[in-house]
Image (cartoon, helix red, strand yellow):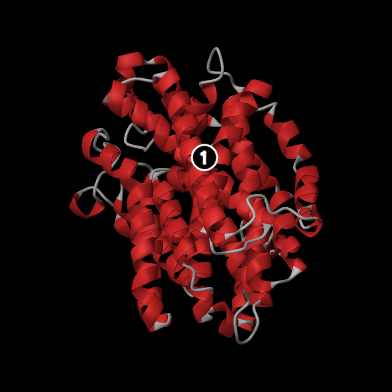
Amino acid sequence: MIFAAIPYLISFLCGLALVRLILKEYSSSLFLSGVLAAGTGLGISSHLTFLSFLVFNQLNRPFVIIIHIVVLAVLVLLDFINRKKQKIPVIDINQQRVLSLWPLGLFLFLSIPLWYQSNFYAHGGWDAWSTWNLKARFLYYGGEHWRDMFNPILWRSSPHYPLFLPLINVWGWCFQKSAALLIPTLTSFIFSLLSVGLLFTGLKRLTRSYYSLIPTIFLLTLPLFHKLSYSQYSDNVLGFYLLAGLVCLIFSGTEKNKGFAFLGGLFLGFLSFAKNEGLIAAVLIGGWALIYFLFFTEKNMRWILCKHLCIGAIIGGLPTLIFTLFYAPDNITFINALSSPNATLLPRVKMIFSFYLVEMTAPIWNLLVHTHILKFDILADPKWRGWWIALVIILILNWKRAFDKRTIIVPLFLASYMAIVTFYYFLNVYFEIGWWLQVTLHRILFAILPATLFWGFGSLWLDKEGDNS
């Protein structure tokens, strides 16, 4: 267990040094800094591990470990020099900042059932052992033949999917004698905690209210959150970096901070390498953020924020570009409905929106079935515990703050992202639509769940005017 923790600790320290360096003239909470540092560090580790395959065409464990140590040493040295120059304490930890970490203790306590369950599901769900963990084992054991994972015969393993999560697991295995099951379990658990931590710290900073604990406790005790967390899917990673990008870009605008703009861009780059949907999400968030910076921030900050966002996105998204151009095979699980003579389009549209309706309004559906208003015998699984209904009510009763300019990029992103996802469900007729919606729609919604909680509850406690920073 100790050796399993070493790579994650190194990643965290790399991320912490970089976050301190980027936000050098800025004082953030210890909890928020820690969450951002962990997310940044894991992204750095994924990219540095990928570098081994670019340089040696295989995993070179000594190279990966050494380059991590070198990067950590350089970042720590730069941070030390900068803090001496700025006359900022190298270590600024006081009793008040330490006591502010008490929610972390609460989250760790509430996450005990999640960790306990994870150990009984060590191989993860079907998409973990057949896709993400399989890719990680190709990278770890494959030597110079690691690119065999892109063989079309493995089409069920989605060879065109990017490698962010598998590379993190490979980095974890660099300190193991074999591809231990503990590492993917630990990676998934960490990202679950990071999503919960960022939801709380982001809301707390935006609203300055400890009511921010409510949505985080809801998330951490939601059975579906547990299930998809210990399933080791990349949707967990997607959800964290999606929220991280949104939170940092919102803070960069409200607090006029170029460091947050850079971090936001960096997280969008990581997001684009997590999954194909992540690339779409990154482009949408980045595009809406640029529009927001250009039209809703002060003139003297507009181009500065845009520049730092783009620089961060380019650095974070470089592996995505390399993978897409030189490694990723074509997606063979796609048939265009518009050019397919056998496609039945109208029933497909009805099926898509029927699934949306039942999935997101399950409690109402079940009530109508029980009262025999609906002549169906099938009950829906209320897996979301009524959250989507609650979100609609919040938006109706609180629409002005829900569409406040400070957080406007969240609803703009959610609307455009779900529109694209819905259109892709309609356009791709390779899969039987009923089965496809049944196995993927709840995961699409799971990935955006932290962002919707941030938006919904944030609008409740956002002040009516002024800045919450």
Q: Residue at x 73, y 53 (%)?
A: 93
In the rendered image, which quarter contains the N terminus? top right
Q: Report how many numbered discs are placed on residues in the image.
A: 1
Q: Residue at x 43, y 56 (%)?
A: 351
Question: In this rendering, is residue 5 above or below 251?
Answer: above
Q: Residue furthest bottom?
A: 465
Q: From this viewpoint, is residue 347 visible?
A: no
Q: How busy is the neighbourhood of tag 1: few (under 14 within 10 Å), some, or many (20 plus)?
A: many
296 in relation to 239, above or below: below
Image location of residue 245, percent across then percent down: 48, 58
Q: Which of 445/82 is in front? A: 82
Where is residue 195 shown, x and y percent of the image? Answer: 61, 51
Element type at mark 1: helix
List x then y, in percent, for residue 139.
40, 22
| Frontmost residue, 214 versus 391 | 214
Q: Is residue 403 left or right of residue 380?
A: left
**Which quadrant of the figure has residue 49?**
top left
Could you say which is closer to the camera, residue 113 or residue 77? 77
Pick whichever, 356 or 278, lies toward us: 278
- The residue carrying mark 1 is 42
Left or right, 358 with reference to 411 = right
Q: Quadrant of residue 227?
A: top right
Q: Mark 1 belongs to which amino acid?
A: Leu
Residue beneath the point at 57% across and 78% down: 402
| Residue found 41% across the figure and 44% down from its top | 275
